[in-house]
Image (spheres, rainbow, N blue to C red):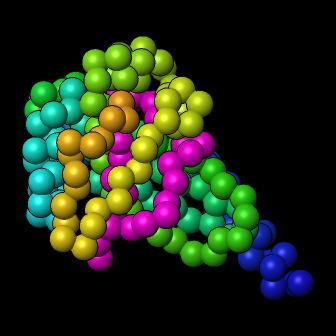
Amino acid sequence: MRLVTALVFAFFAFAAAVQLNSEPARANAAQIDADARATLDRFFQRVVNGRELANKAEAILIFPSIVKAGIGIGGEYGEGVLHVRGRTSGYYNIIGASIGFQLGVQTRSVIIMFMTPAALAGFQARAGWEVGVDGSVALINVGASGRVNTDNILDPIIGFVFNNKGLMYNLTLEGTKISRFNPN
């Protein structure tokens, strides 16, 4: 029990130290754009017809690296870019919190595709867009062949979650908040 108490105390001490910094460590726009392009290229390599799906999308929100850490209570943060028809439309961060059995640190990449003009407009109209409240994101599983059946996707917003080792399954984005920000 003392170990758990010590770990929880250490986690909160670390979180407090990070919060005391007056200026959050943010990447600059050029770095976010470069990381997003590399993430999109990795996605196209892993998902055979990913480019076809991307071409059908109204816009693509790309988070190259979302870091999630926790000891019982966890949090996650990442920065990304929204591409509307291949052009940068804005920079966004994603923030989430969770409670439950968790220990450690995980990094993942997330790509969210807005398939309809209404879904994109709904996202852009909010100052802070919460997954599961302001809009649902259907996470797409990719088969062993790396193919996605693009003809049967009817969801207005779809998402892919993956890391350097491949696509990750049974993950959720529920409860995360996505907000626009201005990079340094």
Q: Is residue 183 visible?
A: no
Image quarter of the C terminus: top left
- Is residue 127 something one can see in this rendering? yes
Is residue 12 or residue 137 the one in the foreground?
137
Residue 64 x/y as whole percent: 29, 53
Q: Quadrant of the N terminus?
A: bottom right
Q: Residue at x 37, y 23 (%)?
A: 119
* Residue at the image point whose x is 54% and y is 33% from the top: 130
Residue 157 percent across, percent down from the top left: 37, 35
127 in relation to 18, above or below:
above
Q: Is residue 65 left or right of residue 88?
A: right
Write down the region rendered in magenta. 158-184
| Magenta-span inclusion, residue 92 | no
Task: Give the quarter of the image for residue 83.
Answer: top left
**Total numbered circles:** 0
Residue 79, position as x, y percentages in the image: 36, 45
Residue, x 59% and y 55% (percent of image)?
Answer: 75
Q: Is residue 174 magenta?
A: yes
Farthest right residue in view: 1
Q: Is residue 19 left or right of residue 84?
A: right
Residue 10, given in percent of the width and then of the height, sits at: 72, 71
Q: Is residue 6 above or below residue 111?
A: below
| Left or right of residue 122, residue 20 in this image | right
* Residue extending farthest front: 152
Q: Residue at x 30, y 31 (%)?
A: 114
Q: Is residue 100 above or below residue 58?
A: below
